[in-house]
């Protein structure tokens, strides 16, 4: 006899199994374990049919199955089937995005978990800028899985039906799908997840200092203090790039710059390594990823450092005219 071919699908606290009929088979052993396909299996039941629902499982915990056909002579057994992994899930669906913030040319991955998803499932994404949105297909990540995934890229280009989601800085991005049946009487329920667009601009803009947005913060990254972990607000205002300027704390009144750390990027967080010993003042400054930096912030309404560029990271000019938000 030949081995049957097994397929499985998750249900709420259950696994739904079916397999191909084997010529000359009289019964089928359903084998299961909770450890993996390469470990020993225990006989769960013996059936004359080619389908079985395993009840009373725990949602979220995988179970592993094989089927073995048995002839009229119980000593005549076929090879065991392929191993099928089934992870039971409640019917109520969930949707999530792989990040909380995306740039203007980022790849968004959408994950939906739904144990009774219909045929040809899709997810729609919209943004504050792109209200028409884009609809993308999502596909099951593996046979028998209740997890589906799809992807779409963002763009700074104007809204168009081009398979790309148009966004601008500080847009809200929303992904949603319709959960046709939540298993508890709910029909056609909207499930959604959201994120924020943080797009680098071409200008050198100010970094939020607390008078608008969330103030920059720095914390010791190691015991010696040679690494400082920096965070700054890119949701309120973001430049094409960012850098740090610093100086001796004793000279903070004159803001005499003695060094810089370059190319911090646009994520809003960076580890500044090689920090000089001693007491320092420092500030994160936006730049145009070229030769112009933005404001260092204001003090009593006046620009800190005036209009003179720091001279760090290839910067030769300074533009204090940028405003946010």
Image (cartoon, rainbow, N blue to C red):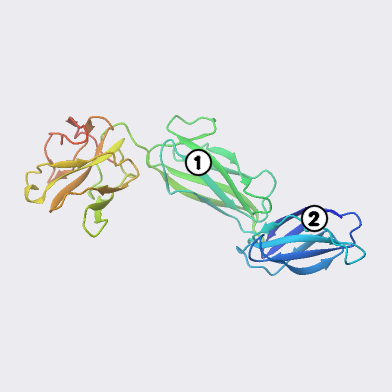
- Which image quarter is the N terminus in? bottom right
Residue 17 in picture, x, y percent from top left: 75, 59
- Which image quarter is the C terminus in? top left
Numbered disc in front, either 1 or 2: 2
Q: Residues within 10 Å of mark 1 (few under 14, many from 20)?
A: many
Q: Kindly identify the residue that appears in the image at 54 percent across and 33 percent down.
A: 163
Instruction: Describe residue 130's horizontal placement relative to residue 14 as left or right.
Output: left
Number of numbered callouts drawn: 2
Residue, disc 2: 19
Q: Extreme front residue here?
A: 75
State whether residue 91 is above or below residue 275: below
Residue, disc 1: 126
State whether residue 199 is above or below residue 160: below
Tell me, yes or no, whether the two marked residues, 1 and 2, touch with CB atoms within 8 Å: no
Near-viewer residue (176 or 187): 176
For marks 1 and 2, the one nearer the N-term is 2
Instruction: Describe residue 308's horizontal placement relative to residue 44 as left or right.
Output: left
Q: Residues within 10 Å of mark 2 (few under 14, many from 20)?
A: some
Residue 33 in picture, x, y percent from top left: 68, 66
SS class, disc 1: strand
Residue 70 in picture, x, y percent from top left: 86, 62
Residue 90, picture quadrant: bottom right
The Cα atoms of the two marked residues, 1 and 2, are separated by: 41 Å
Near-viewer residue (242 or 238): 242
SS class, disc 2: strand
Near-viewer residue (74 or 240): 74
Q: Kindly identify the residue that appears in the image at 54 percent across and 41 percent down.
A: 151
Instruction: Describe residue 131's horizontal placement relative to residue 244 as left or right.
Output: right
Residue 290, picture quadrant: top left
Residue 62 in picture, x, y percent from top left: 63, 62
Instruction: Describe residue 270's horizontal placement relative to residue 176 as left or right.
Output: left
Residue 57, picture quadrant: bottom right
């Amino acid at each position: 006899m030949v081995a049957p071919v097994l397929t499985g699908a998750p249900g709420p606290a259950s696994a739904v199994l079916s397999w191909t009929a084997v010529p000359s088979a009289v019964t089928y052993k359903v084998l299961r374990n909770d450890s993996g396909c390469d470990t020993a299996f225990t006989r769960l039941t013996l059936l004359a049919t080619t389908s079985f629902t395993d009840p009373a499982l725990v949602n979220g915990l995988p179970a592993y199955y094989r089927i073995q056909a048995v002839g009229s002579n119980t000593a005549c057994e076929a090879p065991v089937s392929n191993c099928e992994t089934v992870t039971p899930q409640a019917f109520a669906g969930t949707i999530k995005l792989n990040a909380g913030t995306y740039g203007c040319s980022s790849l968004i991955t959408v994950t939906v978990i739904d144990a009774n998803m219909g045929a040809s499932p899709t997810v729609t994404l919209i943004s504050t800028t792109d209200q028409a949105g884009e609809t993308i297909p999502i596909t099951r990540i593996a046979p028998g899985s209740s997890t589906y995934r799809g992807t779409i890229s963002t763009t700074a280009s104007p809204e168009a039906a081009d398979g790309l989601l148009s966004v601008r800085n500080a847009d809200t991005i929303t992904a949603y799908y319709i959960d046709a049946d939540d298993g508890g009487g709910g029909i056609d329920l909207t499930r959604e997840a959201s994120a924020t667009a943080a797009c680098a601009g071409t200008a050198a803009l100010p970094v939020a200092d607390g008078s608008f947005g969330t103030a920059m913060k720095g914390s010791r990254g190691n015991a010696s203090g040679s690494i400082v972990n920096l965070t700054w607000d890119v949701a309120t205002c973001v430049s094409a790039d960012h850098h740090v300027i610093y100086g001796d704390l004793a000279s903070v009144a004159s803001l005499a710059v003695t060094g810089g750390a370059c190319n911090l990027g646009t994520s809003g967080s960076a580890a500044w390594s090689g920090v000089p010993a001693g007491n320092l003042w420092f500030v994160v400054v936006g730049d145009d990823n070229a030769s112009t930096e933005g404001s260092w912030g204001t003090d009593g309404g006046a620009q800190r450092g005036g209009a003179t560029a720091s001279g760090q990271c290839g910067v030769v000019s300074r533009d204090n005219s940028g405003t946010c938000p």
